[in-house]
Every structure is written in structure tokens, then in C-alpha cells.
Amino acid sequence: MTDQYAPAADTALWPAPTAPGRIEATVTVPGSKSVTNRALVLSALAAEPGLLRRPLRSRDTLLMAGALRAMGVGIEETASSASAATEPGGARTADEAWRVSPGPLRGPATVDVGNAGTVMRFLPPLAALAEGPVRFDGDPRSYERPLHGVIDALRALGARVEDEGRGALPLTVRGAGSLAGGTVEVDASSSSQFVSALLLSGAGFDQGVEVRHTGGTLPSMPHIRMTVEMLRAAGAQVDTPEDGGAAHVWRVAPGALLGRDVTVEPDLSNAQPFLAAALVTGGRVTVADWPRHTTQPGDALREIFTAMGGSCELDERGLTLTGGGRVLGIDIDLGEVGELTPGIAAVAALAQSESVLRGVGHLRLHETDRLAALAKEINGLGGDVTETEDGLRIRPRPLHGGVFHTYDDHRLATAGAVLGLAVEGVEVENVATTGKTLPDFPAMWADMLGAPAGVKA
Ligand SMILES: O=C(O)C1=C[C@@H](OP(=O)(O)O)[C@@H](O)[C@H](O)C1
Ligand SMILES: C=C(OP(=O)(O)O)C(=O)O
């Protein structure tokens, strides 16, 4: 499978369109990255084939699918999706699906993780269950992202991992076809994905797995809840602190997983820039199919954007955010919902009052150092953003146009687009980097604005 959204050394500039007025639109956002990649892993470990409806097709999910195929899992378009017509603009029709046929996991295989946290962290535990070596490599940035928690835990659980002492990528997992499993301590303060990774494959370990988080504050709890909920839906027995268990201890019992028919929810974190458009222009944007119940962190946007001056209504059409004509600053701990930080920072830079975003020090090790990048790029447009130990302080100032660099970070690119709605002359570098999770972003943005999409070389 080719990596069609791999980053080129792309310096193309995308003139971010300014809003012609209050934006009024209904938007359908593609499936959740986090749900798609969990569903792929769980389906690969199941005892029977499963179906994944409306999967996200983006760099991160195509890398996950490609990796699983390389390890012996069948992932095919269903007949309905293969014959489904594409909609104008290339979007697929909603009845598309992937059929996932688990097979014996095997090496030798090579996995390209790109810069996908979900791929680099969720797959080494699965590879420990394969027979034969699986080599993991990725983008240069993937070498810098924390992986030690997964590597050390796998070794403690009985796996052979060769990383030449780096505690990071590239590495090889030499699976023996099974793994003892058992209890393991992990410091997951740098990424909740360490915990999710071990739980997702835990039912396949001989003794299951008990994961004990031992470090400082654990970020992104909703993503751990998503892991638990999806494991349970696949038939796994999971004990969590929320069910009265010990704090920071999760347990997955050994056992077979069910092949399921899963429909992927829209990606609520990717809905963020569209909702932000309503907030900063005093308009109204509806995101279709917003789930009534979800573990996605993006659901917190209802509360956050209400506190920042909007109002939200969830009904059969989806979630409608109406801007109140003014944007308020916010003082908030975003540790649970860290991936929303770039979009909130963009809105905060356009607000009437100061914002303090806290609890997100671990974002320094995301796709890029997001705190440094946001401060530098917003300040490059005339803003006043300072980094704190665990976040950002944003004092709104009148902004001017300029190049908004994106550092191969999809969420920097969408944050730049939000700023461009209100500030003339913002040019977003390498908007194609949104392909990590939202390949159609420029066309969707243009549709929302009723304008043609364009990139200036
Ligand atoms: O498990 C997941 O799907 C994710 C967990 C979070 O990672 P961190 O806990 O490393 O922030 C989040 O930021 C990332 O976008 C997706
Ligand atoms: C942090 C993110 O991604 P990853 O899954 O690569 O960690 C993100 O999408 O904001």
C-alpha cells in the first residue's frame, strides 16, 4: 500500500480564505482516526471477520491498514464500497466499508508508522503476538516521540524488542507467536497511548494484561475510555479504576475477541475548525451525525466553545454551534483533551480577553512541539503568546497576514485556517499535511465558505 499522504518537503502556501461574513453551513466530517485505528487493531485480533463501516481514509489509518496487511491480516473493500460511486470532490459514499479478515499474525514484515502515534504505539504489542520479526520505522519525527513505555512494558511482559538502546524507533519486535503477559508498570504521563496500546492487545496475551500507570498526570483519559469501551464491545473483560478498581490500574482478561460490525463516528476533533468558524464569525455551523454518546475528546468542544461565547444545540441534525458575535478568552486545563489545543489556541488569539491553556506540557512531543509552534506562528502574525511550563498564555492582539508554518502538523494547518477567517493575508504552509487525518480539508473548507479551494506554489 503506498503512502499517498506522505509528507513531501512541501512549502506550498495556501491562501487561507477570509470569511465573507457570518458563516452558515452544514458539514459532514469523515470518520474518527482514533476509532478507526482501534477498530482495525481489534478486528485483526478477533476470532472471526469483522466489518468497519465509514472508516477514515487518511494517512494515519492507511498506514495502520497497510501495517496489518503486512502482518497477514486481510483488509478489503466490501463489494458495496468497491462499486460505490464517488461523490463530487472525491469523497466516498457513506455505505463504504472495510472487511477485516484476521489471519495468523506473522513476520517478517516491515511497518511504516509515518508519524502516527496510534500506529507506532498500538502495533508493537500486536507484533509481539506474531510469529517472526516485525520491523518498525517512520518519519524522522517518529524517532523523537515517546515510545519507551511500550518498549519497556513489552520486555517486562516477555517480548523480545531490539531498539539498540534507543527506547524509541526504529525497532524490531521478534514475536514468537504468543506472549506471556501479566502485570506491568508504565509511566504513561507522556502519552495515554502507552496504556491503550497494551490494553488493546492484552486479551491476546496468555495471562491477559494488568497495566499500572506509575508516573505523573495521565493525559487524554477519554482516549483510554475509548479503548476500554471498544474492547468491551468486542467481548473482552476489562476492569478499570472507574468500576471501583484501584486508581490507575486497568486489567484485560485473556480471551477471544468478536469480529464486529462497527460504524465509525465522525471525527469530532476534526469537526473543531468548522465549529470554530461559526464561533469566530458569529455564524452557525452544524456538524452532521454528532453522536449522542461518545468517548471522543472532541465532545468537550460543546462545553469549551460555549464558555468561549458560542451556544450549542444537539438534535437530530447533529451539533449546531452558533457564534454569539464575541469570542471570550478561557482559562482551562486541556490535559484530558490535548489534541484540541491548537484549535482552541487559534480561537483564543481572536478573543476579547486573555486565555490560559494548561495541562498540556506533553504536546511538546506530539507531531511537532505544538506549544512552541503555536507561540511562534501566532506571534509571527502579531500575536502575544507565551509558553508556560504546561501550556500557553494567549493575550489577544490585532493580527496581520503572513506565512503560518505548520511543521508537518495537521492541527497547526487547521488552526492557521481558523485564524485566516478573521485575518487577511494568512498563508498556511503545506496544507496537505492535513492528510494525516483529514485529506479533504481544503475542499471542505472552501465548501463551507462557498468558495473554490486553491494552493499557491
Ligand atoms: O489514543 C488515541 O487515539 C490518541 C490519544 C492522544 O494521545 P496522547 O495521550 O499521546 O496525547 C491524542 O492526543 C491522539 O491524537 C490520539
Ligand atoms: C496527537 C495526535 O496524533 P497521534 O495519534 O499521532 O499522537 C493528534 O492527532 O493530534
Image (spheres, rainbow, N blue to C red):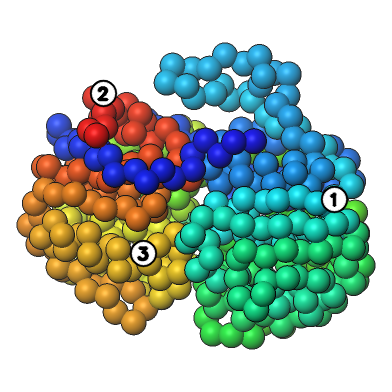
- Tell me the CA gap for discs 1 and 2: 47 Å
Q: Earlier in the sequence, mark 3 or mark 2?
A: 3
Q: Which mark's residue is nearer the viewer, 3 or 1?
A: 1
Task: Tell me the kind of residue under disc 2.
Answer: Pro
Q: Residue at x 62, y 50 (%)?
A: 112
Q: Nearer the viewer, residue 222 or 47?
A: 47
Q: Earlier in the sequence, mark 3 or mark 1?
A: 1
- Tell me the CA gap for discs 3 and 2: 29 Å
Task: Tell me the kind of residue under disc 3.
Answer: Arg
Q: Which quadrant would the C terminus be assigned to in this image? A: top left
Circle 1 residue: 106
Q: On residue 370, which mark appears?
A: 3
Residue sitting at the far front: 164
- Tell me the CA gap for discs 3 and 1: 36 Å
Q: For residue 16, which quarter of the picture?
A: top left
Circle 2 residue: 452
Q: Is mark 2 within 8 Å of ligand 2?
A: no
Count of marks overlaid on the render: 3
